[in-house]
Image: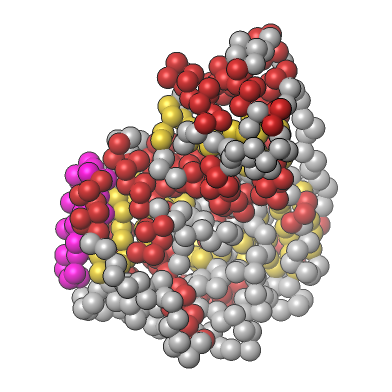
Amino acid sequence: MKGSRALLKMLEDRGVETMFGYPGGSVIPLYDEIPNSSIRHILVRHEQCAGHAADGYARASGKTGVCLSTSGPGTTNMVTGVATAYADSVPMLALTGQVGTGLLGSDAFQEVDAYSLMMPITKHNFRVTNIDRLPHAVDEAWKIARAGRPGPVHIDLPTDKFNAELDESLLNVDYGIKPMPENFSAIPDAVKLIKDSERPVIMAGGGVISAEASEELVRLAEMMNAPVVTPLMGIGCIPSTHPLCMGALGMHGRMCATEIFSNADLVIAVGTKFSDRTYSPHTKPAEKCKVIQFDIDSAQLGRSGRASVNLLGDAKKGLKLLIEALGKSPEHQAWDRTVREAKARCACDFNYYTHPIIPQKVMKELNTFIDDETIITTDVGQNQMWAMHCLDFSRPRQLLSSGSFGTMGFGLPAAIGAKAARPDCKVAAVVGDGGLQMVIQELATAVSEDLPVVIVLLNNGWLGMVRQWQKLFWDKNYSATKLNDNPDFSLIAKAYGARCVTVERAGEVHDALAEAFGCGETCIVDIHVDPEEDALPMLPPNPALPLVRGRCKY
């Protein structure tokens, strides 16, 4: 069997139904076989977006995303998409073409050392220089992507190996990998800390969603009557409307989440890495606060910098063990009252009918279209923070956003990937005019591949988040953040065969969204919002500066 056919068959055997890619000279032999494969190939318009679309596919479905590029610039273009998935622990198989094995190291046309390039941003790398090693590379890569803490794995494929002959019997060999270590022996110590605590808080991150442990997390919270704070990646692991859900924690987190977290005497951290955006001098509890940390990645354990009971392994399994061992949880009535009061105070006073439109109005109306079968992706910046604050989600995998890498341009291609994974769902991307213009060519992908998504464009004519920093901390020196001569997005949408609804009045927002969701086509809702509205509250980069509260009532 030719290497190109063998590769596709191995992917088919592993349940791959969709891949995202862009062809080039070194991968033509593979593309020659794709029409004969059961795998749907979605042609993106830029290789970075192949990575983001595979990422969105994986986050929406829980499966492994697959992306493909040619050698040289195709590979370097895809790096940002792979790095984004790596930073947020998303399972992905990144396939790159390479020059022939006889040309490696000769500075051949479109040669780049993809193996070294991908090494810092993947869990593992393979370069197949012997066709008999292709089954090993695919099988091991597929397992590594999902083993332990998920992430992308890269396979570099010299073009001559696509045409090389492979003994078909090798395809059926199961190449095992070592089981991931686990250690839950400290469960009794965790139980003791819980029983001794008076102000417990659960911090639930993206690892809860990856482990499909949301049901166990909510059960533990209800047993303990403990409030739950969620970094961006953990949103959806507990319903937004749940009485114990305090919302997002972090630089732009909710005030009630910050207040409760900073006053805790015990933090139960599940699948979260104590990043600088969530765990800062403004949010850290007192030094006597203790930590129970669940994580599948041993490198993350102990990063809170305080006394910690560390539990290594799958979050779902670990939470089940803790629930069984805990039995009846102690009551802490004073803390329960504090939590209820903090959440009740965390209400914002907005006039939703101002002109220009405030972004919070857009989120309020978007909420009316979100049900259990809706997926929202975001770009990065103010649009992301308003979505994080204001939108309500009832289940995991409803909010897809670039967290640790903060990649502008993520929203639209991730939405296309999510729609490919879940065609039954309504999918919308909340984006800014800066991020959308980085990837606007992907409108062609959405239209040509019949993957209709709604693009909720918060158009303020600025690189909004950088402008906000300049406004609050750099004496309003607005350097290189004004988007002069923004295009007419309705004309761009029309050129790509998409639709566009332009909104300039608050009273028009709901009807415009209804039209976009109801038309069955890819549609931009171009909403002109107030450039002076900031995404608040905001924890300043300098711990000596006070928190910027915004319009919260307390």
x then y, percent, for residue 217: 59, 51
Asked which quadrant contains residue 381, the reply is bottom left
The residue located at (30%, 36%) in the rendering is: 448
x then y, percent, for residue 473: 52, 86
Q: Is residue 476 above or below residue 119?
A: below
116 sits left or right of 536 in the view = right
Any part of residue 30 in sight: yes
Q: Is residue 554 above or below residue 504?
A: below
The residue located at (59%, 40%) in the rendering is: 110
The residue located at (67%, 41%) in the rendering is: 107
The residue located at (41%, 71%) in the rendering is: 463
Q: What colour scheme has been applied to the protein in the rendered image? A: secondary structure
278 sits left or right of 457 in the view = right
Any part of residue 345 in sight: no
Residue 513 among those drawn in magenta: yes
Which residue is at the front of the view, 509 or 316? 509
Which residue is at the front of the view, 316 or 65? 65
> The N terminus is located in which quarter?
top right
Which residue is at the front of the view, 141 or 236? 141
Residue extent of the magenta highlight: 497-524
Residue 351 among those drawn in magenta: no
The residue sitting at the right extreme is: 185
Count of number-bearing discs: 0
Asked which quadrant contains residue 8, the reply is top right
> The C terminus is located in which quarter?
bottom left
Q: Is residue 294 above or below residue 18?
A: below
Asked which quadrant contains residue 193, the reply is bottom right
x then y, percent, for residue 32: 47, 20
x then y, percent, for residue 476: 44, 88
Which residue is at the front of the view, 124 or 107? 107
